[in-house]
Image (tube, helix red, strand yellow):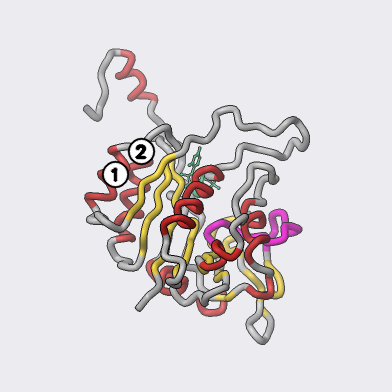
């Protein structure tokens, strides 16, 4: 049988949220071994998110959590490169939930799945192949200023580098969507977590430094030749007419 895949998704309220989550929920309908840990960046869980999950029939295949990102999160003025990191609090809460609720003795996979990327069904077939104690890796499309950011392999199909153009000096110059992790590593390394105290683009390196080394990465997706996930970004919704309506006490979505 396939290992369970715990997909961890931070999400926050904005006009396109329901559209993004509906898109993802339909993918979940096609992948029976997925369990969705959806963590709202909010003071409470919302009916909007719960209804999307229920309408997709995910009844007992999701866990809905919430934790609000502290509004004034800032580091005491050091590096001007510090920016507000996204999803840190939410992903850490999900990891805590996993460590206290998941079955330690059952092989499972953990994937950090942002709500706006585009995922091929085959990606989940690929990550099901991750071996206990390993981190699986694959290319990501449309990220880091490239068509494809990918690991570089040697003749024995071991990862020996990365093609990253943006901040290639990072220990793991890859996107959050480029890897998934055998769950046992989170029990083996209980201190593994995301942190606010890292520079932009270093969240991936931050979590992975606890869990693996580059040469231990398990290449998937046809030895990192296939692109099965894209770092798409949804443009900010323009609501100028809606704002005019609301000034008259009306709205289009009543
Ligand atoms: N996110 C969040 N709170 C925020 C901003 C983002 O929970 O204030 C979530 C978002 O829904 C997504 C993830 O964090 O699942 C990454 O955010 P985003 O896609 O905006 O980051 P980018 O693609 O720019 O790296
Ligand atoms: Mn994104």
Residue 171 pos. (x, y %): 72, 60
Q: Which residue is mark 1?
A: 50
Looking at the image, which residue is at 78% across and 34% down?
78
Magenta region, residue range: 164-178
Instruction: From the viewer's perspective, tell me whether residue 162 is left or right of residue 32.
Output: right
- Considering only vertical position in the picture, is 253 above or below 9? above
Ligand 1 closer than 8 Å to label 1 CB:
no
Q: Is residue 156 above or below residue 238?
A: below
Corner quadrant of residue 168 = bottom right
Residue closest to the far top: 248
Could you classify mark 1 by the number of other residues whose Cα lies within 10 Å: few (under 14), some (14-19), or many (20 or more)?
some
Label 1 SS? helix
Q: At 50% across and 51% down in the image, what residue appears? A: 96
On the image, which quarter does residue 217 sit in? Answer: bottom right
* Side (left or right) of 214 relative to 48: right
Query: Main structural element of the magenta stretch: helix, strand or loop?
Result: loop
Q: CA distance from mark 1 to mark 2?
A: 8 Å
Identify the secondary structure beneath mark 2: loop
Closer to the camera in the image, 104 or 142:
104
Between residue 129 and residue 152, name the one nearer to us.
129
Within the magenta stretch, is there residue 168? yes
The residue depicted at 53 percent of the width and 48 percent of the height is 92
Count of residue discs? 2
Q: Which mark is residue 131?
A: none
Label 1 close to label 2 by CB (< 8 Å): yes
């Amino acid at each position: 049988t396939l290992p369970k895949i715990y997909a961890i998704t931070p999400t926050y309220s904005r006009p396109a949220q329901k559209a993004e989550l509906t898109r993802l929920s339909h993918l979940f309908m096609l992948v029976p071994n997925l369990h969705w840990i959806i963590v709202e960046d909010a003071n409470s869980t919302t009916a909007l998110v719960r209804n999307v999950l229920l309408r997709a029939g995910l009844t007992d295949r999701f866990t809905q959590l919430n934790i609000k990102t502290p509004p004034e999160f800032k580091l005491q003025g050091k590096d001007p490169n510090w920016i507000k990191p996204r999803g840190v609090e939410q992903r850490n809460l999900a990891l805590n939930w996993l460590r206290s609720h998941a079955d330690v003795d059952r092989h499972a996979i953990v994937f950090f799945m942002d709500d706006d990327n585009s995922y091929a069904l085959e990606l989940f077939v690929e990550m099901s192949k991750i071996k206990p104690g390993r981190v699986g890796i694959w290319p990501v499309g449309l990220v880091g200023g490239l068509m494809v950011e990918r690991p570089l392999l040697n003749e024995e199909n071991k990862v020996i580098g990365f093609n990253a153009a943006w901040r290639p000096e990072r220990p793991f110059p890859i996107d959050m969507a480029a890897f998934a992790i055998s769950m046992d590593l989170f029990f083996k390394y209980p201190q593994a977590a995301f942190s606010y105290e890292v520079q932009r683009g270093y969240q991936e390196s931050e979590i992975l430094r606890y869990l693996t080394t580059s040469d231990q990465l398990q290449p998937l997706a046809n030895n990192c030749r296939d692109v099965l996930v894209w770092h798409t970004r949804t443009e900010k919704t323009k609501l100028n007419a809606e704002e005019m309506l609301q000034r008259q006490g009306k709205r289009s979505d009543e």
